[in-house]
Amino acid sequence: MLATVNENSNDYEEPDLFGPAGHRMNPPERDMSLQVPNYTKKRPSSLCSDDGVLDDYEYEGSLHSQQGSFYLPNTGVLASTMKEDTSQLSAVIKMGWLDKNPPQGAIYYQRRWVKLDADYLRYFDTDKDVYSKGIISTAFITNVTTVGELKFEVVTNNRTFIFRAESEAERNEWVTVLQDCTSGRQRHTVMNPGSPLAPDYQGYLELKGLRSKLYTVVASDKVFLYKNIDDYRIGLGITSIEMNVGNIKDSDRRSFDLTTPYRIFSFIAESEQMREQWVNAMRDAIGEALSNSEVAERIWAESSNSLCADCEAPKPEWAAINLCVVVCKQCAGEHRGLGPSISKVRSLKMDKKVWTEELIQLFLVIGNERANSFWAANVPPSEALSPSSCSEERRRFISNKYRQGKYRRYHALYGNQRELNHALCINVQCSDVLETLSLIFCGADVNCSTGLESQLSPLSLATAHSQPLQAELLNHNLNTELPRLEEVDAMDPEPYPLPPSVSHNGFLFKTASMARPVTERKAKEEFSRRWCTLNDGVFSYYESDKNSNPNGALKASEIVCLASDNEDRHGYNNTFEIYTESERLYLFGTDDSEVKSQWVKSIAKAFIPVSAEPLLRLNFERIGKLMCKDGLNLQRSKVGWFALEGSVLHVYLEGSQVEEIHLRKLNELSIQQDNEVMVLVGKGRTLYIEGKRKLDFSCWCAAIQAAAGSGGDRLHEQQLTETDIPVIVDSCINYITQCGMVSEGIYRKSGVNSRVAALCERFRHDARSLCLREGEHQVDDVSNTLKRFFRELKEGVFTTQDSPSWLSTATIQDESTKISQYKKFLNKLPHVNKATLQTLIKHLYCVQHFSDENQMNNHNLAIVFGPTLFQTDGKDYAAGRAIEDLIEHYKLIFEVDEQQLNKQIEVIEVIHKMRNLKNLQPPSERGGDFICTVYLEEKASGERHVKIPGSMTALELTLEILDQRNIPIKDKDYWSCWEICCKEEMERPLHYQERVLPIVHSIGTESHLLIKKHAAMEAITLYLSSKPDASKHGMIKFREERSILGLGLTSFHERYFILNYNSLRMYKDVRSNRPEREWPVKNLKVYLGIKKKLRPPTCWGLTVLYESMKQEKPERQQWYLCCETQSEMREWYATFLSIQYDGNVWPQDGLQHKRVSRELPDTRHGNVSLIPLRGSENEMRNSVAAFSQDQLAVGSSASSDVP
Ligand SMILES: [Zn+2]
């Protein structure tokens, strides 16, 4: 094949091989390049130095003599293909006029039109030429450097090209893009050393009119012409011919024509046989080129794909394969501008290799319309594109749409990383690729761990479940950068308008960032001085103010929390903490409190959205965002912006006003579900704050708990009720009212000192969490706790300042003067003191009302309470006299409505009577907000709506329902509250002490609560009482849930189980030494029954749910145990129960003794809004609308009516 190379090679420039172009069009270029075999062979130096390709004069002759044959009339199939074909859509990185150095021997530069794409640097005679004079494969460019004035060198292994630009800027730009391009190329080449695309056919061919033969390479859908094989090997060619516009015609024995709209190339092969091979190879290349339009035709078969997803221009020929949209040429250009980490742009026509059958199917299944139902769910009409939009508009729109995800439809789990990942793992096992698209671009981590050993990633999971389209979609998004709202204009309202740009700078001292809360004191030495700037939504810190590259930078959009520490917490007096989305904590300090406060204000301003701006005006200690749910919408978490100031938590939820939550007045504050959720039950509402991120959540919890606790020993620093009475006072008084009104010597008798001290301590620690219960607590302990509280109160209820005035008032003889004087001082008291005093005196008034029974008349009470409240030693009666006055003239001094007071006393009399009659326990719960639907005995019996306070236990709910229905409890009636699931195929009796509210929140719509008798309880208690300790072992048939929850035993297999202490262990058989699995029993929920569709081998099955939130990755497994007999199953069940509740499976003295009197003024009806918790959001809304005017005031007013 080696032909003679033209030796007359001292020409000064490559010849104009093809003459002036007849058309203005350039050949379409491809992303996919011809990859030249990756080896180089040293060329004889005599040929290296020469820029010439062909013999000039010979060429000149051929041009003129054969000119006619170079053109093809611009008609027919090819021509029409060309019209649609486009030139500018290729991945041209840069093009422009440059002067190219003269070849050896010549002295003047050649003006050349130069074009660079990822694969080739090409130069043309004019900007209208289709076929180049020369192409340099970027893979072979080893260096690009500036040389001399306006010049730069492009160096390959064998040759150096010198170009001269018209300006310095132009030159530098060429150098930059070439460097970028070639360094990327080389990396690419190194990464794929073994995969050069092999040419389909190659060899020397004679081109008519030229004396020398050209080394011709047919590769994929292109034909490349090289001067000789050596040039081919070093990546320096003459031109390439796109075969999609080509046609082959045999002419005579050895010759054939390759015609294009611009040229006819008349080739002469070495033999007839060779011609046959060349013709076949080139026809294959045409076939390949044309088959590429098949892809487009197929993609357009989905009708919405025939319009650009962004601007609706017809017949879009490009696609962003990771975003699943088909776009037009112009939009594709803007997509390319986003970079491949955001949009992977491919041609439908030219990037044939990428269009696997799966990718085509993916585009047919999703299609532009469905893709836009996600990407363009919220496009303001004013921002929408049209085919005639200008490039500026396109750029902005496309950046908004894909870089920022501004118009996308937010997934319900948005912001909830764990659930998003989980949902992704589940979803890739089914065929819903649109959902996967939505999950990925709302933040699900494509590379998250599935928790499975065999299929570690969602991609492998999709493959394992035979979901090739899911796999294709995941595969194209493994490294995708997710949409981020980072460059939002101040004008853009969605979804959180970012604040206007804040600028601030100065020196701060910084410690290394941390992944855990700062608990220890950081000494000054641990801080380093940094120059810090806040600009354009980025907080950066630098080694010094002289450095231009920051040591680190935090985008404001990444900041989730900002906390201002108390003074003197660290070596620097004034410190603040920044928490980021990625769970890092940055601590900064300064000596100057003013500097700190400026920074805190500026940073807060930079990340708090405009809508939550009122929070910025606060003197907050902590500010940031958290996910939360509230009572009306438990299905969906939303973003809440929070600021903590003193004991008030200010909350801004989407679309509402900033609210204040007085933490010391909460009814309940608890952290549930393994530290995942913080529950705040306050006046009329419950807020669930979710710990999606651990770091800032744990710090928020600590701060909120501290703020909600008592703040000191003064009255107003206590945890307060809604009426501003310390919770401890309220609790004790309520308890005495219910249980101690007729107790002889109440308040005079002393309790057991150690118990009183313990009670005081518990109240001091968290009064809210302590619920006084009859049986558990003694009347005299409680009464003494109350007295001790007042005695130890700092400044006393009458205040240090005014106590003497109160005492001297007691000495006034004239009754009416005295009373008006008391009234005067009463009104001088701070609000909390006044409210507390009034409550206490009212209580004492009631106590003395029952003095016939309790022996505590006014005087006796005054002897006790005088010194207590005035904190005197009690040696004189001044204090007692004052208290006696207050009780005696209670109605006058406190201006009490007599009727109301009498009613109150009547109520107490009723309580007293009831207690005498039934010896029952009073209701003693506060708070609670949820109305839940509960059924009695069977679902068909009709539902009951019950208010479920946060602290309500299953037993209390059971009794409440039985009371509502007036159902008497007989001996050995084991009434229980059951969670009924899965169309009643599974059920679980709640333990009597189990709190109902978390269950209500966790059960799905398929489940409900039912009150019915527990038929097996007697057998269970008998069985347990017969055993020395709770343990059991034996064979059980075991099966796991298929799917992500565990790929293991998916049918029932015998296993040996040991259940004791706190763990359940599973062994392959009796003789095995090591358990196959082990679970902590406390994390198991055991249901009676197994879904029938799992075909359990016997009907004595248990369904076990294992949930653990504690680890980094929460676990949730479900599996099944099947026993041979019913008694076998009961024994296992009883053992589980006994271990979980330390042997306390049923109330010791049965239900009757626990029964609560419900004949008190009823709080369950009246103005309580009934909101069934289960059911759809709509049902809830309707229900709210029907029952309540104040949507948040669920049951709030009712609870305060409790006497
Ligand atoms: Zn478009």
Image: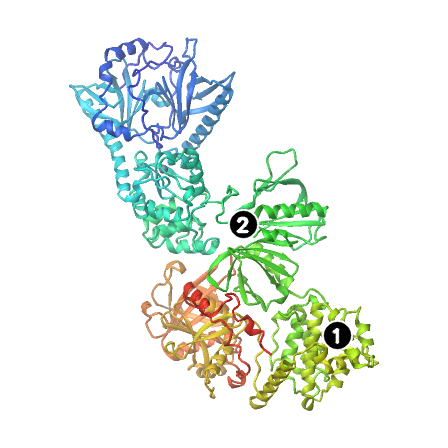
Compared to residue 456, the image places residue 500 above or below, namely above
The amino acid beneath tag 2 is Glu
> In this orientation, which residue lies closer to the viewer: 857 or 668?
857
Which one is closest to the eye, mark 2 or mark 1? Answer: 1
Q: Quadrant of residue 602?
A: top right
User: Left of 341 or right of it: where is 328?
Assistant: left
Pinpoint residue 101: horizontal percent, then vertical percent. Answer: 43, 14
Report the colour scheme.
rainbow
> In this orientation, which residue lies closer to the viewer: 1136 or 91?
91
**Residue 706: which disc?**
none
Judged from the image, the secondary structure of the residue bearing numbered disc 1 is: helix
The C terminus appears in which quarter of the rendering? bottom right
Residue appearing at x 65%, y 33% in the figure: 546
Residue appearing at x 36%, y 63% in the figure: 1049
Pinpoint residue 870: horizontal percent, then vertical percent. Answer: 78, 75
Which residue is denoted by mark 1 in the rendering? 823
User: Left of 903 or right of it: where is 131?
Assistant: left
Circle 1 crowding by C-alpha within 10 Å: few under 14, some 14–19, many from 20: some
Pinpoint residue 652: horizontal percent, then vertical percent. Answer: 55, 56
**Residue 581: which disc?**
2
Pinpoint residue 766: horizontal percent, then vertical percent. Answer: 64, 69
Give the CA distance from mark 2 to mark 1: 56 Å
| Residue furthest left as drawn | 252
Q: Confirm if mark 1 falls within 8 A of ligand 1.
A: no
Compared to residue 1019, the image places residue 871 above or below, namely above
Q: Is residue 754 visible?
A: no
Compared to residue 453, the image places residue 191 above or below, namely above
Q: Is residue 68 visible?
A: yes
Sequence-first tag of 2 and 1: 2
Judged from the image, the secondary structure of the residue bearing numbered disc 2 is: loop
The amino acid beneath tag 1 is Lys
